[in-house]
Image: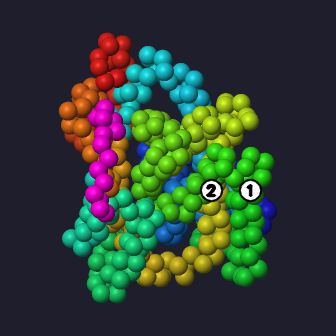
Amino acid sequence: MPAGDVVPFGQAVRAWFAISLQTFGGPAGQIAVMQRHLVDERRWIGQKRFLHALNYCMLLPGPEAQQLAIYVGWLLNGLRGGLVAGTLFVLPGVVALLALSAVYVGFGDTTVVAALFAGLAPAVVAIVVQAVWRVAGRALTHRTLVAFAVLAFLSLAVFAVPFPVVVAVAALAGWALHRRRPELVESAGGHGAAKDGPEPLISDDTLHHDRPSGRRTATILAIGLAAWFIPVALFAVFTGTDSVYTQQGLFFSGTAVVTFGGAYAVLAFVAQRAVEHYAWLSAGDMVRGLALAESTPGPLIMVVQFVAFLGAYSNPGSLDPWVAGVVASLLTTWVTFVPCFLFILLGAPYVERLRGNRSLSAALTGITAAVVGVIANLGLYFAVHTLFSRVHEVEAGPVHMTVPDFGAVRLVPLVIAVVAAVLIFWRKWSVLRVLGVCAGLGLIAGLAGLPGV
């Protein structure tokens, strides 16, 4: 086999393609799919090495499951293995969500399609509540960490503190907490205590590795940054710095480096800026876009593709609106996922050193605790804009918050949200199954002409 390949490259490509078609259910489900295919069935990599890679990916901004695919692909087949694994991991989702975005824009105002989306939106509220519950159970192992979550929620929901500031302060607070109470940080560790799993067919010493060097780092950094920003620069030159393409390229490049704690953590920030500042779409559109992203394979952060499509379709400039939507969607996908490749390929040779760094683990603990509050704020945002037909902005000194008009509650979405919560928390149904039921309820309500659909 060529240098760097520890498994036949063609066989690895087929394995990654099979994995890419099963990446539903959020990062936990995606990691479980890779665990089953790579560790349990094919036994290409051992459990400890798999979790070693996952721990590193947890330190990084961006979708940890896709970064884990890049890392394991690099271990098995070198540079081309990482590129293929990471690309295939998101490709089915890109294609599916692009098609669904076009359907939404083209047919979203018809009775049937509008009713289907009206049923999906309330389900998202229950799904986000489930995400808060799951992350809280894993991250909030001490009342001090609960305080992190509460303060993060209040900072965003009541005082409108920018999301990057919340992340930075949480990281610093986690580091400071480690210096005073290190046992809190160590007790919050996630993946290290798992079982060894089946013995791999390929020893750890055989897996691909590169010697860390300044030349390698500079080369990857130069190529990665060029690949990341040259497309945005070209759009700025040919369409202007104020065009929707340049704005989206820069904005989503920024969100790519602050997406700690999963997609839910940054989506409230994305929704607030995309809806209220740039006016690329409405709050209702944002909720329905998240429902579509939940129903397609790949990382949930793929919803930014939907945001870009609608924003460019409404503000196409000199392009045809449909062409503009596709171009903006692909540009946004590019600037969102190229950093993932850069982070992994740049840092993989140093992963052992980083994994043993307790200060970095402490910063991650602070961020993870704050993420609970961030996701709770996202749930509040979606609930307010889905379950109520009118909201009010309250501004008084440092307070800046959105308050619903409780006399304008929408009964049909409220009932669907309750049904979704029952199915998720009591019946333990999967997200896809719940979305299907709620879409059906929305369709029935729409065809019956019930108000609020």
Q: Residue at x 69, y 53 (%)?
A: 241
**Relative to the observer, which residue lies in front, 116 or 37?**
116
Tag 1 secondary structure: helix
Please identify the quadrant where the N terminus is shown. bottom right
Disc 1 residue type? Answer: Ala
Q: Earlier in the sequence, mark 1 or mark 2?
A: 1
> Whole-Å distance between the Cαs marked 1 and 2?
9 Å
**Relative to the observer, which residue lies in front, 202 or 153?**
153
Horizontal and vertical percent position of residue 325: 64, 36
Q: Residue at x 28, y 84 (%)?
A: 181
Disc 2 residue type? Answer: Leu
**Residue 233: mark:** 1
Residue annotated with mark 2: 250
User: Magenta stretch: residue 390 in it?
Assistant: yes
Q: Residue at x 73, y 49 (%)?
A: 240
**Relative to the observer, which residue lies in front, 244 or 33?**
244
For the record, the magenta segment spans 385-399
**Residue 371: mark:** none
Q: Residues within 10 Å of mark 2 (few under 14, many from 20)?
A: some
